[in-house]
């Protein structure tokens, strides 16, 4: 954790709730028990087996995970009622001092950790706590050769071999590493900037480094490098590493080990900052340092009550697991779904191609000061803004399934149409009234100083030429609960919360619209596309991967979709007619994929439950 004085949000440091810690500790002991590394049958066997194991938390924080391990050991010791308390206490103290380790960057956080351990376990108050160390778990000694002495001191490197000598590896590494994008945080935080430069230049990290890596990637690498043979790693981390393209090296490295479990917790909110839930979706990942030969247990939509009551019903979690073959995974995005065989059928290259091969996919433009450039139609009329500089402008709320609601769209002043501002008196007057706002902000200031924009320009003219060239396109909001692809025939521009799809063959537009709004694509995208919690995220890369049937038989679907578009443009309620055509579209799309629609429907219905 970078600096205890800074906000937790700034450093990506959030303390893990007790029920999550206890669950993770319990799963670790479950696997230790399965392999007879911890034997619970008697105090003698328990003491002997546990005494051989070492535990480490490389990002201690307030010590929740160390406390969780100690609590589990303490509770097991209480069960040996015939053993004298003194003997149990001596073992417990020795276990803490010689079998439990931790690293924390901040001295105040470490002091808090020690105080909490002493509070929960008074017998440990007199311990030296020399097993809990200060330092940065992912910064090695080579930082002094890369950075200035001041910068190296600021990062506070940690030498695992020297600090934990003679121990060089651990049987269990467990914890909750910090989360934040190193490159982005480097723009806001000096420590993060220095850390990013170190990781970029370090020989230790050169084969793992990616410019858009998250800091927790390095904690996973470091932990795996310090696991004993057969050792266990259990981290609660964001789930974006499973599909993020910049985590490909991490996924490839993890696949060299046996993944035991991945619990998708995207349906739960785990962490708070100042009383507000964080918009982070998490997973618990449990990995073993051995050659991968077994399947992976995957759990999704696990109710909070299962995590909270795991100690009462230890086998309840088993009802949520399904298994996938680890050999099916590569460094590319992982699809962790019980429906993999069905998804592979949809993606069969002999029957399908990808949307990216059939269409251009672009993100909307970025005005920079949207509240000034984008105006209502009534305001444009009131100000008498010149029509030659105006274009229809939509946001994600304008996109309905099948159609774009142009009637409620707004207008945008498009400065690229302006060569000489003097030629557009009313527009000029309006923009000059907002001059101070148009030059405000660090990004606008930087662009203006480098002469990359005029004071009345958009910040970024992303995809301007494409939006100007094509009047007809398919629009989709970048985030939605279900696919919502709408036909725009009005030459609308979109903001960055919109993606536009322009077929390479103009006549394919209704065919593709029907495919994209079908139940099959909804199913495929929710399982193999991109999502955050319950929301589907329609970004360029996952959109490009959508499988589209190869066929010359497009007329039936095209005609059905044209009728569906006509109905949805009509303001008169025609739900019954639309429902019937929707069924016909889904059956026709299923036929083109070579799929039994009733079989698909059963899968969709099962997902709802």
Image (cartoon, rainbow, N blue to C red):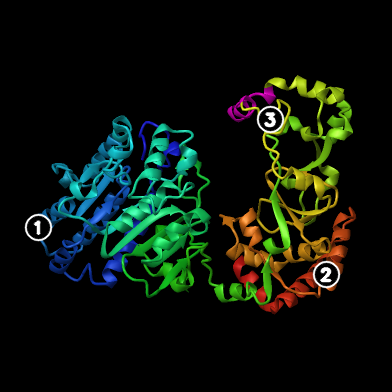
Give the label, 1 or 2, closer to the camera. 2
Contact? badges 3 and 1 (CB < 8 Å): no
Name the disc covering residue 87, or none.
1
Name the disc covering residue 316, or none.
none
Say which of 294 and 597 sits in front. Answer: 294
Going from N to C along the chain, the mark reached first, 3 or 1, is 1
Position in image of residue 578 (x %, y %): 84, 64
Q: Is residue 487 left or right of residue 324?
A: right
Position in image of residue 541 (x %, y %): 61, 56
Give the SS element for disc 1. Answer: helix
Name above or below for residue 600 compared with residue 491.
below
Q: Which residues are magenta?
A: 437-449
Mark 3 to mark 1 CA distance (whole Å): 76 Å
Q: Is residue 493 left or right of residue 230?
A: right
In the rendered image, which quarter contains the N terminus? Answer: top left
Residue at left 83%, top 65%?
561
Q: Give the residue number, with chain letter if any, for mark 2.
A: 580
Position in image of residue 230 (x %, y %): 27, 67
Mark 1 to mark 2 CA distance (whole Å): 75 Å
């Amino acid at each position: 954790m970078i600096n205890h004085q800074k906000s937790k949000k700034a450093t990506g440091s959030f303390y893990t709730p007790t029920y999550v810690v206890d669950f993770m500790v319990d799963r670790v002991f479950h696997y230790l028990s399965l392999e007879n590394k911890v034997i619970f049958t008697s105090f003698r066997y328990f003491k002997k087996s546990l005494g051989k194991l070492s535990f480490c938390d490389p990002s201690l924080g307030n010590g929740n995970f160390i406390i969780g391990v100690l609590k589990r050991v303490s509770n097991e010791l209480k069960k040996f009622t015939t053993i004298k308390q003194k003997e149990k206490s001596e073992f417990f103290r020795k276990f803490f001092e010689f079998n439990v380790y931790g690293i924390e960057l901040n001295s105040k956080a470490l002091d808090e950790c020690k105080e909490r351990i002493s509070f929960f376990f008074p017998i440990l108050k007199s311990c030296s706590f020399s097993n809990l160390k200060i330092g940065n778990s992912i910064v090695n000694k080579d930082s002094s050769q890369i950075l200035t002495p001041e910068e190296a001191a600021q990062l506070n490197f940690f030498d695992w071999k020297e600090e934990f000598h003679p121990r060089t590896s651990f049987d269990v590494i467990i914890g909750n590493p910090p989360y934040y994008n190193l490159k982005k945080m480097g723009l806001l935080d000096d420590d993060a900037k220095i850390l990013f430069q170190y990781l970029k230049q370090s020989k230790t990290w050169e084969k793992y480094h990616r410019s858009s890596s998250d800091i927790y990637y390095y904690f996973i690498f470091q932990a795996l490098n310090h696991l004993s043979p057969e050792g266990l790693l259990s981290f609660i981390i964001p789930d974006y590493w499973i599909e993020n393209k910049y985590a490909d090296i991490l996924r490839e490295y993890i696949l060299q080990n046996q993944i035991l479990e991945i619990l998708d917790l995207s349906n739960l909110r785990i962490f708070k900052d100042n009383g507000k839930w964080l918009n982070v979706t998490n997973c618990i990942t449990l990995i073993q340092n051995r050659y991968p030969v077994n399947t992976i247990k995957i759990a999704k939509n696990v109710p909070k009550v299962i995590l909270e009551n795991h100690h009462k019903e230890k086998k309840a979690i088993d009802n949520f697991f399904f298994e996938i073959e680890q050999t099916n995974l590569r460094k590319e995005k992982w699809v962790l779904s019980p429906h993999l065989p069905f998804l592979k059928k949809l993606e069969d290259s002999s029957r399908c191609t990808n949307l990216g091969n059939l269409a251009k996919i672009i993100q909307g433009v970025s005005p920079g000061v949207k509240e000034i450039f984008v105006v209502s139609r009534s305001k444009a009329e009131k100000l008498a803004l010149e029509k030659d500089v105006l274009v229809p402008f939509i946001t994600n709320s304008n996109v309905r399934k099948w159609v774009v609601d142009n009637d409620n769209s707004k207008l945008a002043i498009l400065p690229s149409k302006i060569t000489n501002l003097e030629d557009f008196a009313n527009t000029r007057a309006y923009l000059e009234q907002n001059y101070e706002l148009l030059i405000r902000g660090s990004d606008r200031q930087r662009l203006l100083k480098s002469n990359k924009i005029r004071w009345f320009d958009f910040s970024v003219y992303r995809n301007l030429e494409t939006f100007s060239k094509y009047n007809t396109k398919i629009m989709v909001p970048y985030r939605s609960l279900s696919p919502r692809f709408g036909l725009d025939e009005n030459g609308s521009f979109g903001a960055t919360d919109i993606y536009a799809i322009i077929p390479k063959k103009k006549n394919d537009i209704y065919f593709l619209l029907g495919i994209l709004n079908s139940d099959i694509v909804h199913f495929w995208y929710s399982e193999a596309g991109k999502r955050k919690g319950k929301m589907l995220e329609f970004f360029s890369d996952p959109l490009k991967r959508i499988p589209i049937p190869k066929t010359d038989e497009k007329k039936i679907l095209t005609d059905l979709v044209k009728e569906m578009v006509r109905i949805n443009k009509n303001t008169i309620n025609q739900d019954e007619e639309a429902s019937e055509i929707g069924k016909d579209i889904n059956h026709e799309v299923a036929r083109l994929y070579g799929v039994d629609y009733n079989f698909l429907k059963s899968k969709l219905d099962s997902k709802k439950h």
